[in-house]
């Protein structure tokens, strides 16, 4: 809080009685509680509406994918369906494709985040029997999220079934409607002849027709019969379990290939990383950070074509992590008259001079601003799970003559004894003093803001790198928070959580 000396001199003779002060605090607490309930309800409704919209969008993508020759046979999980929707036709397949979309149907960053059965959030499941996503309640499911780390992921190609419409074999402008193999896209005519001076009375345009088709070679007076339709593909391999993150204690994983075609139709093959293709005869042992590829190959090419190759990457994550946290303030910033002290083992930062000069006499108006970080150890935290790194104590005090700080850094050090790993990162904290409005306690609240919520940390476990996501959590009744900021009411002292989440890169 910043106070001018003139205002302070006029107000130092006024005050509140103990009863009035207690009543004011009670009203503020009640308003904060009611606001929290209202905001929680709005958040739930907003999240539910967003999920319904996401489900409708994903089901539209499935419909478009299937109508353009895609196949979801054997894709029983949401992640498997999403992988299929991200595929693109191969270069050779695109050359014969008549329909509109030939690339991926959804953003490459789309993925799922699990939602437990007892969580308040709305969630979805994938129904393999109807090939649609559905919104559900009271059972475990997932929500759709965007992961920027997937933005540059390589697009997987596949050959899709041809459409009922194909390019005509002889005409450059007409499509055939037949279940035949598509010829390559025609180039179209290259020579035009037009009336050089068209008028309203003579608007005709002469177009030189294409060359006539070659005479039939099959004898008789008819045209050649269309080539036979391309045989269907063997099915998409069903791999259990799917790739992705798995508990480290489960490795080596036992991976099975399901929906294998009959031996008279095809053979299953697999390879691990850059190894050779091997006939599949039973469960496959997969080590950490290995890539598995599976394909069904045809026995008789007149009956079936080779199936598409399915690729899955398996990496290990720890079941839980436990660690010790420490925080140290350093490198404050402010104006030319900045006054500060870092004490108590560097976890307390005091700033601002509460003394002002009135008629040449120094007057102490109270306490300066205080920001303190009380670190907290954590036990048995799973990657992807939020946990408490500690708690901020913030006293919204008095300061004069531009002596307050406008920023400070907090170095957070985390030791994981069970892993033999220690890493640290700096939180960049803005310290924002707001103008005081006696009619608006929320607008008058000073606050701390984190400007770098995402932290690239030097941590690798089982060959997998991790980053840290940070945010403010719950507060007491003397403040409130958003994801990036912690606010404390004017003249009050409040506490707020600092939360962290380990995320695999």
Image (spheres, helix red, strand yellow):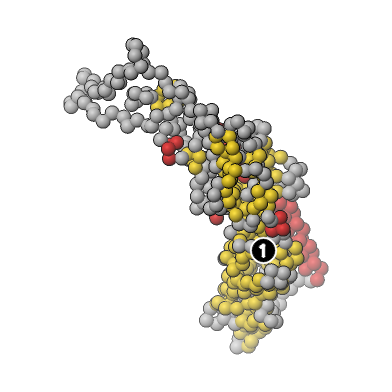
The answer to which image quadrant residue 247 occupies is bottom right
Coordinates of residue 269 in the picture (x, y in percent): 58, 42
Q: Is residue 296 left or right of residue 370?
A: left
**In the displayed structure, would residue 277 be above or below residue 410?**
above
- Which residue is drawn at the image coordinates 37% and 18% (left, top)? 224
> Does residue 137 appear in the picture of this structure?
yes
Coordinates of residue 245 in the picture (x, y in percent): 65, 54
- Which residue is drawn at the image coordinates 67% and 44% (left, top)? 282
Residue at far right of view: 19
Residue under numbered circle 1:
500
Count of numbered circles in the view: 1
Dot 1 falls on a residue whose secondary structure is strand
Residue at far left of view: 197
Q: Residues within 10 Å of mark 1 (few under 14, many from 20)?
A: many
Q: Is residue 185 left or right of residue 501?
A: left
- Which residue is drawn at the image coordinates 53% and 30% (left, top)? 300
Nearest to the observer: residue 20 or residue 73: 73
In which quadrant of the rendered image does the N terminus lie? bottom right
In which quadrant of the rendered image does the C terminus lie? bottom right
The answer to which image quadrant residue 225 occupies is top left
Residue at far bottom of view: 360
> Does residue 497 appear in the picture of this structure?
no
Nearest to the observer: residue 311 or residue 62: 311
Coordinates of residue 32 in the picture (x, y in percent): 73, 58
Nearest to the observer: residue 487 or residue 310: 310
**In the displayed structure, would residue 280 be above or below residue 474?**
above
- Which residue is drawn at the image coordinates 62% and 43% (left, top)? 280
């Amino acid at each position: 809080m910043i106070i001018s000396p003139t205002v302070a001199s006029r107000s130092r003779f006024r005050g509140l009685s103990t009863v009035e002060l207690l009543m004011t605090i009670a009203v503020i607490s009640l308003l904060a509680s009611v606001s929290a309930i209202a905001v929680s309800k709005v958040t739930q409704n907003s999240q539910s509406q967003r999920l319904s919209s996401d489900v409708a969008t994903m089901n539209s993508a499935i419909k478009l994918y299937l109508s353009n020759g895609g196949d979801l046979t054997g894709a029983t999980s949401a992640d498997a369906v999403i992988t299929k929707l991200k595929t693109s036709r191969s270069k050779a397949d695109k050359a014969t494709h008549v329909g509109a979309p030939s690339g991926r149907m959804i953003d490459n960053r789309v993925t799922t985040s699990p939602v437990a059965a007892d969580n308040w959030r709305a969630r979805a499941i994938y129904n393999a029997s109807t090939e649609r996503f559905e919104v559900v309640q009271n059972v475990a499911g997932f929500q759709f999220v965007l992961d920027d780390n997937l933005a540059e992921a390589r697009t997987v190609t596949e050959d899709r079934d041809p459409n009922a419409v194909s390019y005509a074999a002889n005409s450059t402008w007409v499509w055939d409607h037949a279940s035949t193999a598509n010829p390559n896209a025609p180039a179209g005519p290259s020579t035009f002849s037009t009336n050089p001076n068209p008028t309203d009375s003579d608007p005709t345009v002469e177009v030189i027709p294409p060359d006539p088709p070659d005479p039939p070679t099959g004898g008789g007076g008819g045209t050649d019969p269309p080539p036979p339709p391309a045989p269907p593909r063997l099915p998409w391999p069903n791999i259990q379990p799917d790739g992705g993150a798995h508990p480290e204690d489960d490795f080596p994983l036992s991976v099975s290939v399901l929906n294998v075609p009959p031996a008279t139709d095809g053979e299953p093959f697999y390879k691990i990383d850059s190894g050779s293709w091997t006939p599949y005869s039973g469960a496959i042992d997969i080590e950490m950070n290995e890539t598995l590829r599976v394909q069904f190959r045809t026995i008789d090419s007149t009956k079936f074509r080779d199936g598409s190759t399915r690729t899955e990457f398996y990496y290990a994550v720890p079941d839980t992590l436990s660690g010790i946290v420490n925080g140290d303030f350093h490198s404050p910033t402010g104006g030319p008259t900045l006054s500060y002290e870092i004490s108590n083992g560097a976890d307390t930062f005091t700033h601002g001079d509460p003394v002002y000069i009135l008629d040449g006499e120094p007057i102490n108006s109270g306490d300066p601003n205080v920001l303190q970080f009380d670190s907290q150890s954590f036990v048995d935290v799973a990657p992807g799970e939020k946990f408490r790194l500690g708690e901020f104590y913030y006293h919204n005090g008095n300061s004069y003559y531009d002596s307050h700080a406008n920023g400070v850094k907090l170095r957070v050090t985390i030791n994981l004894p069970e892993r033999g790993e220690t890493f640290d990162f700096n939180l960049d904290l803005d310290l924002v003093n707001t103008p005081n409005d006696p009619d608006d306690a929320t607008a008058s609240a000073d606050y701390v803001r984190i400007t770098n919520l995402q932290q690239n940390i030097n941590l690798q476990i089982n060959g997998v790198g991790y980053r840290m996501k940070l945010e403010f959590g719950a507060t007491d009744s003397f403040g409130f928070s958003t994801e990036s900021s912690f606010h404390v009411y004017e003249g009050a002292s409040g506490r707020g959580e600092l939360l962290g989440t380990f995320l695999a890169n």
